[in-house]
Image (cartoon, helix red, strand yellow):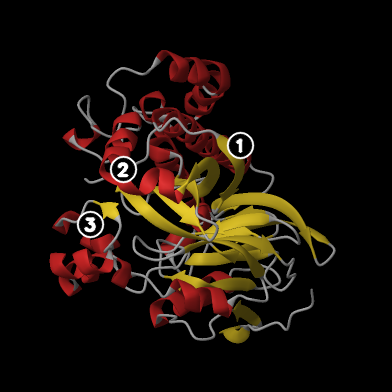
Amino acid sequence: MRTTPQFEVIDAGGGSFIKAWNRGVQFEEKAVEQLRQTARLPFVKPYVAAMPDVHWGIGATVGSVVPTQHAVVPAAVGVDIGCGVCLTITNAKRENVQDHLPELRARIEKAVPHGRSDGGGARDCGSWGRVPEEIQAIWNSEFREEYDGICDRHPGARSKNAERQLGTLGTGNHFIELVVDENDRAGILIHSGSRGLGNRIGTYFMRVALEKCEKADVELPNRDLAYLTDGTRAFEDYVAALHFAQRFAFRNRLIMMERILHALSLREVENVHCHHNYMEHEEHFGERMMITRKGAVRARRGDMGIIPGSMGAKSYVVRGLGSEHSFHSCSHGAGRRMGRKAALKAFTVEDHIAATQGVECYKGAEVLDETPGAYKDIDAVMEAQKDLVEIVHSLKQLVCVKGLS
């Protein structure tokens, strides 16, 4: 399938540039300036790719693909390391679930801890009070020894809730949805990451990177763009911790999926699973490089991915078209069109109820920052990247569970 590239080249100064998939979608100026800062870093080559869901983020822009050589920027991955989405299409049809949505939502909420309370302490609703035996066994066999090794070298990277949060959802834009596709097949869609463990690792190494740059008198365009250089112990330790957190996030979603399928008495028919906040070594334009995707999904030719919309909009299962221009990447969602504080001021509970009509979900003021109007139009985002992916399935939520804090 041949497609015409539809990006715009944005000059970043000093010979640096950005390829931006911005046709028909909003790119806020402060996000564009942030992209320019990233593109001007001396080890970012050959350019930064900006997906249509781009919006401002801490350090690096959400919806960006950053190729680097011999250095890594911890903030370009962010603190929700390994965040991503998994979808399981089940043996159920819409007719099997449509009349039971409140009950199904209650079962999901009982099966998976979600939200945050007690300041993340012992009574936190988003963590296990007592870790189930099967999850404790997974932690002990797959994660404990390696995590202890990371934290022995870097005590500041340790999370007090690591094993208590394995198999839990979190807050913010993370969600669990019961969806149906265009053939009325019912599925479970989960968006979550590496929880407090990834946050601690990301925050700690962002601080280490800044300390290293300050000690070396490195002039940074933005303090959050501090980096670690290949060949140093800090670089090696960060990359190891990063990949560890990515594995934790992947496993975290699988545990939640298994618990939900059991709680709803459903079985798996097919599934798709992808990260969208992560770093991997890849080859592009004949060179080996580190590709950091912060809010972007890998979309090599034939790769399957998931691009969620907002609480009241469609989500899409896609197949990659292998665009080298985007470093084989596509958007990770609709992308915010306004910040959380602005959304809380802009929308009312009545607005939210209208926007989520037909969706069984919490409709109080606490989720107004996640209301559909706070996000870009998912269909405009999909149109802007039709040279990057093709749509395989469209999904519409019937139930949406979000964690409150």
Residue at 74% across / 54% down in the picture? 282
Q: Classify residue 161 by image quadrant.
A: top left
Q: Which residue is mark 3?
A: 367
SS for tag 2?
helix
Residue at 30% across / 41% down in the picture? 105
Amino acid type, callout 3? Val
- 100 on left or right of 9: left
Which of pointers 3 and 2 lies earlier in the amino acid sequence? 2
Q: Which residue is mark 1?
A: 240
Q: Nearer the viewer, mark 2 or mark 1?
A: 2
Q: Residues within 10 Å of mark 3 (few under 14, many from 20)?
A: many
- 286 on left or right of 87: right
**Gap between marks 2 and 1 measured at Cα:** 45 Å
Residue 242 visible to the viewer: yes
Give the image location of residue 293, x and y in percent: 58, 58
SS for tag 1?
helix
Q: Residue furthest front?
A: 95
Give the image location of residue 246, x and y in percent: 55, 40
User: Which residue occupies the foreground of this view, 9 or 181?
Assistant: 181
Q: Which residue is mark 2?
A: 100
Give the image location of residue 159, x and y in percent: 38, 31
Q: Is residue 163 above or below residue 170?
A: above
Amino acid type, callout 2? His
Q: Residues within 10 Å of mark 1 (few under 14, many from 20)?
A: some
Q: Is residue 328 above or below residue 264?
A: below
- Contact check, label 1 and label 3, Cβ < 8 Å: no
Q: Quadrant of the N terminus?
A: bottom right
Q: Classify residue 392 by image quadrant.
A: bottom right
Which mark is drawn over residue 103?
none
